[in-house]
């Protein structure tokens, strides 16, 4: 029987850091960053045993932009590694395997918003020149 590649399911859990407040426009921008750009950026930092990433958004004081502290977790909840992503590092990030059409919001749990993210086993080609088709 041939080896069939399958899509990878991954959970991204996000929350606002303590004391981090945004305007309505700022919240819309943050939502766009978390649903469109963050899944593309974290893909390149995934390990084979990563099941989820917990992301806390906070304000970076020097640039006055958002900073995202990410903790990559195994299925048993143990930490694999941590990484920080500046908003400038995320915007425009391209990942041919992220499938936003199959990904979805999964609700709120333990103070985090959870999103089920699907990474396709083959390129999805949803971006042309860094912009959605």
Image (cartoon, rainbow, N blue to C red):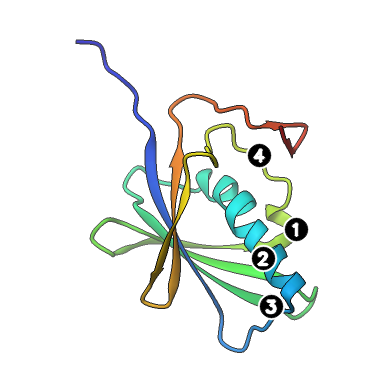
Between discs 2 and 4, the one toward the N terminus: 2
Nearer to the camera, 103 or 57: 103
| Image marks 2 and 4: residues in contact by CB distance under 8 Å | no
Residue found 55% across the figure and 49% down from its top: 39
SS category of the residue bearing label 3: strand
Residue carrying label 1 = 88
SS category of the residue bearing label 2: helix
Direction left: furthest residue: 1
Residue found 78% across the figure and 76% down from its top: 64
Provide residue 26's location: percent of width, then percent of height: 74, 71
Residue carrying label 2 = 30
SS category of the residue bearing label 1: helix
Residue 59 circle label = 3
* Alpha carbon distance from label 1 to label 3: 13 Å
Residue carrying label 4 = 94
Between discs 1 and 4, the one toward the N terminus: 1
Direction top: furthest residue: 1
Quarter of the image holding residue 24?
Answer: bottom right
């Amino acid at each position: 029987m041939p080896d069939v590649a399958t899509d990878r399911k991954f959970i991204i859990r996000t929350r606002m850091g303590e004391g981090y407040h945004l305007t309505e426009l700022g919240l819309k921008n943050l939502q766009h960053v978390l649903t469109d750009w963050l899944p593309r950026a974290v893909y390149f930092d995934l390990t084979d045993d990563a099941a989820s990433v917990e992301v806390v958004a906070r304000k970076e004081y020097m640039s006055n932009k958002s900073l995202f502290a990410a903790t990559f977790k195994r299925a048993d909840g143990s930490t694999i590694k941590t990484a920080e992503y500046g908003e400038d590092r995320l915007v425009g990030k391209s990942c041919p395997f992220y499938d936003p059409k199959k990904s979805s919001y999964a609700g709120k749990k333990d103070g985090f918003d959870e999103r089920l993210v699907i990474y396709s086993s083959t390129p999805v080609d949803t971006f042309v020149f860094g912009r959605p088709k």
